[in-house]
């Protein structure tokens, strides 16, 4: 063991710890490659501080390494659990509920890992996975640096994690993050070299010999070169090109379809600007590909049913339906499903098409659709009104499959459905109430990974964030628990209108929505996904037609194509002479960026660099640490927490240009927000309603901290709404303004 004379001074111990913590912070920042936004960073920095801080304290207390290392590991695990599962703690310690929630989220990540596409949402198990990876990296770095007396070797665990995350993630902030890691690694190597005396004995082994003094330098140079290659390698031409055909998303999702059809689930999240097909029609519509009746608890799919020839007849037009005549021209759509307005009743030519009557699914009998394939289809699109649906029953869809639910469906699904629709007087009333609950209480996000199995449904109901797959699949399962038949439809929203009759349908228009059965009327679509609305359904859904109309970049090129390529020529024109435009395609990223890093040898320059970097790191981290400390759970009464969340939301909205009047009530402020900053209207309205209730109810905020059936409480919901408001504000302001807010908004 080291003697007292060998023991480093407090200042050198703190300096070495801060240098290694700075490197770990750079590793934590690397998760920006897989998460959108920066909300993940505060939690990961807390783990860095807890791990390296605990190690420093234990070293100064002269605790044996064999005790210190497990203690440091347990400290980090406690902090990790407290960050993510605080509501399940009892007397400050994890419980069986903590373990159950952790294992459920791990199962979700296991199901999604091979099919996930970055960025993923910071939640639903992905946050815990990141925390575990960082915990291991921090712990190993601390052990190597201060117990095995390593220098550059201590950087290897964090470097491996950083490269692994970069390999899975997007190109977001790739160069700045890697440069920051290299700079922090060089600083840590220099400081650790100065910290360790050549003859200082290792607490886990023998003394380091002077003969091996050159080895750490060689290892440090190797790491720098490897990390530099990590910058240049991904930028080589074609290194980050999208696959010619996207194969991820082939299992476990809401739109997995059995042979002879095709899985289109991956398109629900790719949001590509690639043009898939062009429709010329006399009416705007959702273009449905299929409807899925069987729910196994893992997927919605089609049962094994024989296909019929379209020559034997299609659907029968229902009373009150609107005739939609459409010509569908395939551009880049693969698979076998032919999209069309519901419900197809006639086809001009069979075009080698087959038909599944139970779901009104049209499919080509060829291997796949091809560019230039053209289908002229007449559909009878049903129209409904609220009064008619209110009096209709929902008892006989013709097949019990539309009622079936798996035996292991979590109880929370039925409990939540019953709670939300309590007081509904008809199937239509329940269906509309459930639709509006999703639209008002949940947030649409493509960062959430595909899937809606049991754990995914529970996670969706807990996190209140997802995309159309989760909305449609969970809605259909919940309405079935009420005894109402349902299924999930998959297809596309109407697409970009090119002229009065022509629609360009892109990859990002892929969509899923639920359909509910009403006796004597048939299948009726509802729209629980926020930001979406089906044309022709306004009279009974109270939702105006809406879809993603984000502007497209005409310079983009499709995956697998070179810039400037055009889709295969189409053989003829549409009847009105309008030629479909060329496909939007995604361009390869072939830019090669170079980064030069130099190691300075002067001791004076080294110390000055270290001091400056430490001061800079402390200045950058200070606002986040102060905010985290001041807003930590349990630090204040529920009443004060609610007040702080309300004031933080007001301050954020002021930064976005919303005029806040002191004399306005919370609900009036929410109305003002809806007018001048509509993207934050929903969370602001929800928060204002809670503040109003707390102001006038006899008990004030009493009970707002109680955890409910699905793992949340009123005060945590308020914190979530505040987070949504702050994120919307950050997304709407300039980078300079975001920096100003970071350093000045400390509440």
Image (cartoon, rainbow, N blue to C red):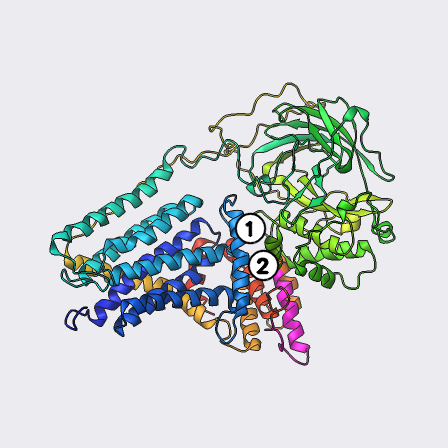
In this view, the residue farthest toward the left is 211
Assess whether mark 1 and mark 2 are in contact (beta carbons under 8 angstroms).
Answer: yes
Q: Position of residue 574 (x, y in %)?
A: 69, 23
Q: Position of residue 171 (x, y in %)?
A: 42, 44
Q: Position of residue 530 (x, y in %)?
A: 65, 51
**Quadrant position of residue 463:** bottom right
The residue under label 2 is 463
- Where does the magenta region start and end? 683-706
**Quadrant position of residue 723:** bottom right
Which of the numbered marks, if any, corresponds to residue 448? Answer: 1
Q: Is residue 523 above or below residue 103?
A: above
User: Which of marks 1 and 2 precedes in the sequence?
Assistant: 1
Please tell me whether residue 378 belongs to the stretch shown in magenta. Answer: no
| Residue in the foreground of this view, choosing between 66 and 139 | 66
| Residue in the foreground of this view, choosing between 388 and 409 | 409
Q: Is residue 180 left or right of residue 128?
A: left
**Residue occupying the point 55% across, 62% down:** 100
């Amino acid at each position: 063991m080291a003697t007292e004379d060998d023991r480093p001074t407090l200042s050198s111990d703190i300096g070495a710890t801060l240098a290694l913590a700075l490197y770990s912070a750079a590793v934590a920042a690397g998760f920006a490659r897989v998460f959108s936004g920066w909300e993940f960073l505060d939690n990961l920095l807390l783990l860095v501080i807890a791990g390296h801080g605990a190690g420093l304290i234990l070293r100064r207390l002269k605790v044996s390494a064999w005790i210190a290392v497990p203690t440091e590991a347990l400290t980090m695990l406690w902090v990790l659990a407290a960050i993510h599962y605080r509501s399940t703690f009892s007397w400050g310690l994890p419980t069986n509920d903590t373990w159950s929630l952790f294992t459920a989220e791990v199962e979700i990540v296991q199901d999604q890992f091979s099919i996930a596409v970055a960025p993923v949402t910071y939640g639903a198990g992905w946050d815990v996975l990141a925390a575990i990876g960082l915990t291991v990296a921090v712990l190993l770095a601390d052990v190597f640096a201060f117990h095995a007396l390593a220098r550059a070797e201590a950087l290897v665990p964090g470097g491996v994690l950083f490269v692994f995350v970069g390999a899975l993630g997007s190109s977001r902030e790739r160069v700045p993050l890697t440069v920051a890691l290299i700079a922090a690694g060089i600083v840590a190597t220099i400081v650790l070299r100065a910290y360790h005396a050549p003859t200082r004995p290792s607490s886990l082994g023998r003394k380091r010999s002077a003969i091996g003094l050159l080895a750490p330098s060689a290892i440090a140079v190797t790491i720098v070169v490897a990390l530099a290659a990590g910058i240049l390698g991904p930028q080589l031409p074609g290194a980050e090109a999208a696959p010619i055909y996207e194969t991820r998303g082939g299992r476990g999702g809401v739109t997995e379809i059995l042979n002879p059809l095709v899985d289109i689930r991956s398109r629900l999240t790719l949001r590509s600007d690639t043009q898939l097909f062009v429709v010329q029609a006399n009416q705007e519509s959702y273009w449905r590909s299929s409807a899925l009746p069987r729910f196994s608890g893992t997927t919605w799919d089609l049962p094994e049913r024989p296909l019929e020839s379209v020559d034997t007849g299609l659907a029968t037009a229902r009373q009150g339906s609107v005739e939609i005549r459409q010509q569908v021209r395939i551009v880049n759509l693969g698979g076998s499903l032919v999209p069309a307005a519901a419900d197809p009743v006639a086809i001009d030519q069979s075009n080698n098409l087959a038909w599944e009557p139970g779901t009104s699914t049209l499919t080509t009998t060829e291997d796949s659709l091809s560019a230039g394939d053209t289908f002229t289809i007449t559909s009878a699109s049903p129209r409904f009104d609220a009064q008619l649906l209110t009096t209709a029953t929902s008892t006989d869809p013709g097949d019990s499959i539309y009622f079936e639910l798996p035996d292991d469906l979590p109880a929370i699904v039925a409990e939540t459905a019953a709670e939300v629709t309590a007081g509904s007087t008809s199937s239509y009333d329940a269906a509309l109430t459930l639709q509006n609950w999703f639209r008002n209480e949940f947030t649409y996000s493509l960062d959430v990974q595909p899937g809606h199995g049991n754990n995914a449904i529970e996670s969706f109901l807990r996190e209140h964030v997802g995309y159309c797959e989760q909305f449609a699949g969970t809605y259909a399962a919940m309405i079935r628990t009420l005894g109402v038949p349902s299924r999930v439809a998959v297809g596309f929203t109407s697409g970009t209108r090119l002229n009065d009759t022509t629609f360009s349908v892109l990859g990002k228009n892929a969509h899923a929505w639920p359909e509910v059965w009403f006796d004597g009327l048939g299948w009726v679509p509802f729209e629980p996904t926020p930001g979406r609305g089906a044309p022709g359904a306004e009279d009974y859904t109270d939702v105006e037609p809406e879809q993603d109309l984000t502007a497209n970049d005409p310079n983009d090129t499709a995956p697998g194509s070179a810039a400037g390529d055009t889709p295969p020529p189409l053989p003829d024109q549409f009847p009105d002479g309008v030629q479909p435009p060329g496909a939007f395609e995604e361009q390869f990223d072939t830019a090669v960026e170079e980064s030069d890093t130099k190691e300075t040898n002067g001791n004076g320059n080294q110390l000055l660099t270290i001091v400056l970097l430490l001061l800079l790191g402390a200045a950058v981290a200070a606002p986040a640490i102060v905010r985290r400390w001041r807003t930590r759970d349990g630090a204040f009464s529920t009443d004060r927490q609610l007040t702080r969340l309300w004031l933080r939301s007001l301050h954020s909205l002021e930064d976005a240009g919303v005029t806040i009047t002191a004399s306005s009530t919370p609900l009036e402020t929410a109305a003002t927000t809806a007018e001048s900053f509509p993207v934050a209207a929903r969370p602001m309205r929800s928060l204002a309603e809670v503040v109003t209730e707390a102001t006038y109810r006899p008990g004030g905020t009493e009970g707002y901290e109680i955890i409910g059936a699905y793992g949340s409480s009123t005060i945590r919901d308020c914190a979530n709404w505040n987070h949504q408001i702050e994120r919307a504000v950050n997304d709407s302001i300039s980078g300079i303004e975001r920096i100003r807010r970071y350093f000045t908004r400390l509440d």
